[in-house]
Image (tube, helix red, strand yellow):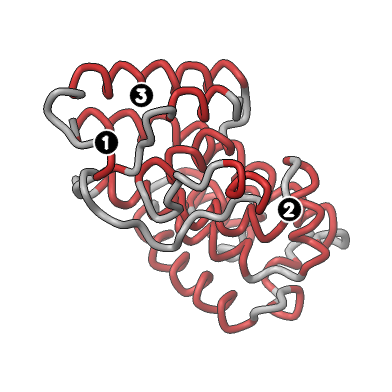
Amino acid sequence: MDEILRDTFRKYIEKAEVYYRTQIAYGFSIAKCTETPYDQHYDENNFYNKKGYREVMENFSREKNYYKDSLIVKHHKMKYSSKMPLWVIVELMSFSNMSKLYSSMYYSEKDAIAHMVGVGRDTLENHLHCLSILRNKCSHAARMYNIDFNPPAKFTTSFLRKHPEIKNNSLFAYTLVLLKRLPDEESKKSLIQTVEKVIDDYRNDIDLELIGFPENYLEIMKNNL
């Protein structure tokens, strides 16, 4: 079951990842990268958490080395002294590092990006962090069953009041985060169907409480399309 869930989550996280890379690069560039040569993302003064930004760029320097043979990297190294536009950087950047980049921005840029995707900045920041954690666990064959996730997933007060059975540090909470952050309804419906099949196939072998899935999990998921 763990293996199937990891494969499932990787597939759908990728859809969310491509979407949010685009939104983050676009939202920040429209706000800050407004003067030629449009490389203001290299100026740490354009970020609120300057220490966090420096860590992001240090990590990216190491990540960039993984792609040193890429034509994109070679082109920008030869023509622009390795200064890449933000839309190139986020394509090469790990999802975890991209989440930290968003976290380092000023409220104005966070709000603009969050508004584009229809969610509050604090929730988006938390959900990006959660998805990066889930992605890393899937990539490293970590166990999905009977573990707590950190950070706890952030949901609205009204949602939690309506569903006190949801533990926000559970696999189900992280599944809901992924569902909420998928960019299209077709992907959301497909994720629900896949999760339902996995749960049905292994229902006699697992304790739903140990993955945080309430008995009415399907209803909750369908109501969050």
Q: Position of residue 170 (x, y in %)?
A: 36, 49
Kindly identify the amino acid type of the residue bearing the numbered disc 1: Leu
Crowding around mark 3 (Cα neighbors within 10 Å: few <14, some 14 to 19, many 20+) is some
Q: Is residue 33 above or below residue 114?
A: below
Q: Position of residue 176 (x, y in %)?
A: 49, 38
Residue ID at (30%, 57%): 148
Crowding around mark 1 (Cα neighbors within 10 Å: few <14, some 14 to 19, many 20+) is some
| Mark 1 or 2, closer to the camera | 1
Kindly identify the amino acid type of the residue bearing the numbered disc 3: Val
Query: Residue 195's mark?
Result: 3
For the question of whether residue 37 can be seen, the reply is: no
Q: Helix or strand or loop: what does disc 1 sit on?
A: helix
- Spatial CA span between label 2 and label 3: 27 Å
- Residue sitting at the far right: 35
Q: Is residue 162 above or below residue 51?
A: above
Q: How many marks?
A: 3
> Badge 1 is on which residue?
208
> Badge 2 is on which residue?
120
- Spatial CA span between label 1 and label 3: 13 Å
Of label 2 and label 3, which has the lower sequence position? 2
Q: Are marks 1 and 2 in contact (CB under 8 Å)?
A: no
- Spatial CA span between label 1 and label 2: 30 Å
Q: Quadrant of the N terminus?
A: top left
- Residue sitting at the far bottom: 51
Q: Position of residue 134 (x, y in %)?
A: 37, 48
